[in-house]
Amino acid sequence: DQQVKQNSPSLSVQEGRISILNCDYTNSMFDYFLWYKKYPAEGPTFLISISSIKDKNEDGRFTVFLNKSAKHLSLHIVPSQPGDSAVYFCAARGRSQGNLIFGKGTKLSVKP
Amino acid sequence: NAGVMQNPRHLVRRRGQEARLRCSPMKGHSHVYWYRQLPEEGLKFMVYLQKENIIDESGMPKERFSAEFPKEGPSILRIQQVVRGDSAAYFCASSPRGDTEAFFGQGTRLTVV
């Protein structure tokens, strides 16, 4: 049973346009959500996070939106750049829990 | 993520041998997590440790796998009597506290032949 789901294995976007990556979760005890970016043969790199008490967090070109009632979060990248091409993982953590639960990832390709 | 050091980067073992994977957390981080990534899969949690303590090992297979994070030195993930199914990328992450983001190392790619 997957508690964190990324239903789109891949996404292709034109350079300069917006990339929207989606993530759904099933566990209502999750209270902290994160996005990681991963290049081949490298470890995941932390991008941005959001606490369950917020519905939006913004950092430069990256914005994460959280809809608790729908148990859904999304990562917006605008404008998208070719260097953003990577696999993006959504992760969640529950209260008093240290470990992260990851989705299977979405491979983003940004075409020049 | 350059601060979390994992070695070796690549490890080849024959079936039945032991594999030892090392992880030095970022300076000031006392929380260490191990994850495994199989091909075409996400990262699966294995174990969460603090210095000298295992906090959560719910993701660790019951047999052949063990982990430690001693008072001095790196965290070690040990796999005894490796099998082909153990071939994967093993990632270590660290954090200063249990309620913040974790920073990952480059991973160790284990290949069992």
Image (spheres, rainbow, N blue to C red):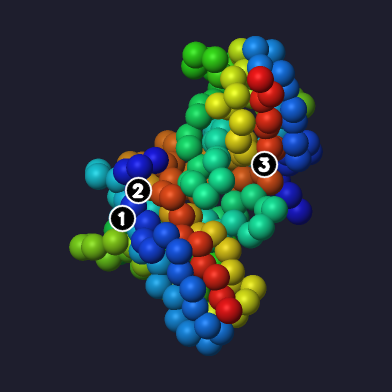
Tag 2–tag 1 contact (CB < 8 Å): yes
Element type where label 2 sits in the image: loop
Distance of mark 2 from mark 1, alpha carbons? 6 Å
Which residue is at the front of the view, A32 or A87? A87
Distance of mark 3 from mark 1, alpha carbons? 26 Å
Q: Position of residue B1 (x, y in %)?
A: 39, 40
Which residue is at the front of the view, A54 or B85? B85
Q: Which residue is mark 1?
A: B24
Q: Position of residue A54 (x, y in %)?
A: 57, 19
Q: Position of residue B94 (x, y in %)?
A: 38, 47
Determine whether, in the image, residue A67 is placed left or right of residue A51.
right
Q: Is residue B62 visible?
A: no
| Residue B100 sits in quarter | top left
- Disc 1 is attached to a residue of which chain? B
Q: Is residue B23 above or below residue A86?
A: below
Q: Which residue is mark 2?
A: B4
Q: Amino acid at mark 1?
A: Ser
Element type where label 1 sits in the image: strand
Q: Is residue A85 above or below residue A41?
A: above
Q: Which residue is mark 3?
A: A105
